[in-house]
Structures are given as structure tokens and as C-alpha cells.
Amino acid sequence: MKVRTLGAFVFAVLFAAVAHADNFVATSDSAAPFSSYNTYAWTAGTTSPDPLTERRIHAAVEAQFSGKVIRLAAPDETPDIYVATHVLTREQKDFDIKTYQPGTLVIDVYDAKTKKMVWRGVATGTGSDKPSKNADKIEKALTDLFRRYPSSLN
């Protein structure tokens, strides 16, 4: 019985470590003229099931671009790049105690002239049932992703 209990405990600890691990990956087109991108506009993506989370993601992306001196294009202005966000989640129960939202956040950046994707950032992790924790995770994920965004200001 002790071996079974110990085995279950070890499994639970290992599962929790993997379930809460965050992973960040970014890829870019090395031929893209990142230093010439000064403006962006939003384009359709896969929205979060929660509208508040979607707004937080957009605000955090806007803050990251602002830090790189890339601004949101005016409505009558043609942007240099288009940005789409994709939020993919699936509900998962942790030993019938708590429900988590393991998810993936994808940020795609397209060159407006060529219509080709020039950068993709992907963050995976586990959400929380506490909105403040999710806001912090979104901010951290986007900060980590945008560290990998190629520009002359990095």
C-alpha cells in the first residue's frame, strides 16, 4: 500500500511540474525587414473564449510593440505588419480537485506588403481559475515571447 501511495504521490508531483511548465518558442523570417516595421494593425485570429482575456492579450501585445517603437496604425493608414492572436485551450481536471485550462497562445505577424508570415511566437502553459494569476501569466508569456522578436531595438 505504501508503494502505491508513494507512486501516486510521485506521479502527482511530476504531473504538476509538467502541467505548470511554460514553454516559449519563436520563429522568424531572417530575410524580413524587421527594422522597417513601424506600424501594425490587427487581423482576425482565434479569439479567447473569455473576452476579458482577449482584451488583456491585445493590451499586452500593444505594450510590447510600443516598447519596440511599433505603433498601432491609424484607421486611414496602411500598416507595415498585421498581427493575429490565437488562443487555444482545453479544460483539464487535476485529480478532481481543480479545473485548469492548459492552453496555447500564438502571435502571428505578417508583412503587409508581401502577405507572408514573418514572425510567430508560441507560448504554452496552464491557466488558473484566478483572473489576476492569468493576467500575470499573459504578461510574462508575452514579455518572454517578444524578447525573441527581431528588431533593431532588442
Image (cartoon, grey):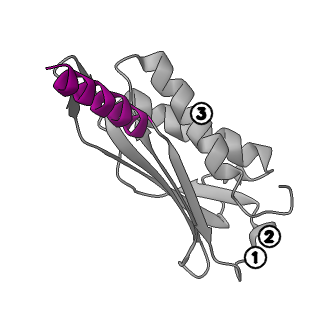
- Residue at image x 16%, y 21%? 96
Q: Name the residue under label 3.
A: 139
Q: Dot 3 surroundings within 10 Å: few (below 14), some, or many (20 or more)?
A: some
What's the CA distance linking mark 3 and mark 2? 26 Å
Taking depth in this image into account, of 106 and 71 the one nearest to the observer is 106
Classify residue 74 as left or right of residue 151: left
Q: Mark 2 points at which residue?
A: 36
In magenta segment, residue 100: no
Q: Mark 1 points at which residue?
A: 33
Classify residue 104 as left or right of residue 7: right
Q: Dot 2 surroundings within 10 Å: few (below 14), some, or many (20 or more)?
A: few
Tell me the amino acid under the disc marked 1. Answer: Pro
Secondary structure category for the residue under label 2: helix
What's the CA distance linking mark 2 and mark 1? 6 Å
**Percent x, y for residue 117?**
54, 73
Q: What stretch is highlighted in magenta?
A: 1-20
